[in-house]
Structure formats: structure tokens, C-alpha cells
Image (spheres, rainbow, N blue to C red):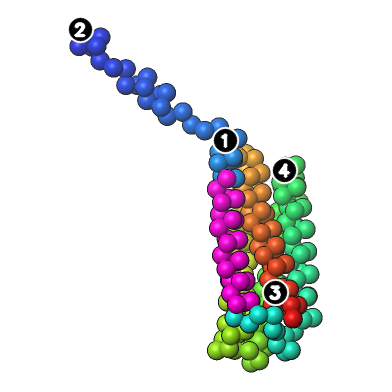
Amino acid sequence: MTVAMGAPDLAAEDSVGTSEESPAERVRTAAVGLWLFIISEACLFSAFIAARYVLEGLRKPDELDQPLGLAVTTILLASSFTAYLAEAYSKRSETRRSQIFIWATVLLGALFLTGVALELTGAGEHFPTSTRYGTAYFSLISLHAFHVITGMGALIVSWNLVRLDKLSELGSWRVEAAVKYWHFVDLAWVVIFPTLYLVS
């Protein structure tokens, strides 16, 4: 009897120590993680962009297809607008419209990659990777294309969550996170395009 009275109340201690975060706190934690990730990615892109200037200064080949570069840039900027609409509609719980604009963003991303692939085909003939500009060009384009692909993947995942109505716990955060990442990828290209195609 004495032993039972003196024993610590482990169940009570466990219940105090295992309090879960509220959805709002989880969103704040996830947002901090996302921004730290984006900052680290920005540092990566900055290193690649700086390498382009270190290798070649302001020189650029005359064979660059600037009209095609401008066309894919316009497509990517349009995808930022559709991504914004997807996020806005998800916040208003208009899931059908949110799904439509998520897919519109993914399709524009695929169109952008198609244009980039066409540009890379011609670029390989005029400034191959064995040249300094070719090294900088293909490295930056490939790095960005990889991020476009991962961004499309994140958007497709968020579309599926909207479709399955699994946004209730954290609200529209999952869509918002994918869209913020997509905006970062678009912003990176806004810097890459003049770096590769315009400076001289």
C-alpha cells in the first residue's frame, strides 16, 4: 500500500509531455522549414550564376536563340499567375478551380521544359560543354530544369491532396507551399535569363 502511494504518476507525466502542436503551430513550423530550404536553394543558384561570370565575364555567344529564350520566359511567368490562382482558390475552398489552375501550371511547366529542350539541342552544336560558356550554360539550365521538374511534382502532389479533400488539417498550406516553391523557381529563371541571354 505504501509503495503504491509513493510511486510516481507516470501516466500523468506522459500526458503532460506529449502535448501535440496545433495545426496553426505546425503550419508555422513548416513555413520556417520551407523558407530555410528556399534560402539554401537560392545560395546554390547564386553560386552557379557567379561561376558563369567568373568563367566568361560578360561575353555571350552570338548563336544564342534569344527569341526562344524570351518565349520560354513568358511561359514560365504565365505559370506563376496560374499558380497564384490555384493557391487563391484553395484558400477559398473552391477545390475544383484550384485543381484546374494547378494542372494549368503543370502544363505550362511542361511547355517550358519543351522549349528548353529545343534550345539545348541547338546550343550543344554552337557552344558544347567542352567550352567555358557551354559549361556555365548547360550547368545553369540543367540545374533550373531539375527544379522545374521537382516543382511540377510538388504541384501534382498538392493537386491530389485537393482532389482527395485532405487539406482540412492544415488548411491550404500544402498547396501554398508548392506554389511558393514554384514562385521561387520562376524567380530564379528571371535572374538566369538575363545572365545567359542578355548581358554583354
Q: Is mark 4 on a helix, strand or loop?
A: helix
Q: Mark 1 points at which residue?
A: 25
Task: Report the magenta stretch's main SS.
Answer: helix
**Amino acid residing under circle 2:** Met
Q: Name the residue under label 3.
A: 195
Q: Nearer the viewer, mark 3 or mark 2?
A: 3
Say whether disc 3 or disc 2 marks the residue closer to the N-terminus.
Answer: 2
Label drawn at residue 91: 4
Q: Residues within 10 Å of mark 4 (few under 14, many from 20)?
A: some
Real-space Cα distance between discs 4 and 2?
58 Å
Left or right of 20, for residue 165: right
Q: What element carries label 2?
A: loop
160 vs 144: above or below: above
Mark 3–mark 2 contact, CB under 8 Å? no
Real-space Cα distance between discs 4 and 1?
18 Å
Say whether disc 4 or disc 2 marks the residue closer to the N-terminus.
Answer: 2
Q: What element carries label 1?
A: helix
Residue 171 x, y percent position in the rendering: 64, 40
190 or 147: which is nearer to us? Answer: 190
Left or right of 163, for residue 81: right
Real-space Cα distance between discs 3 and 2?
79 Å
Q: For the point 66% across and 53% down, which residue is it?
A: 180
Label drawn at residue 1: 2
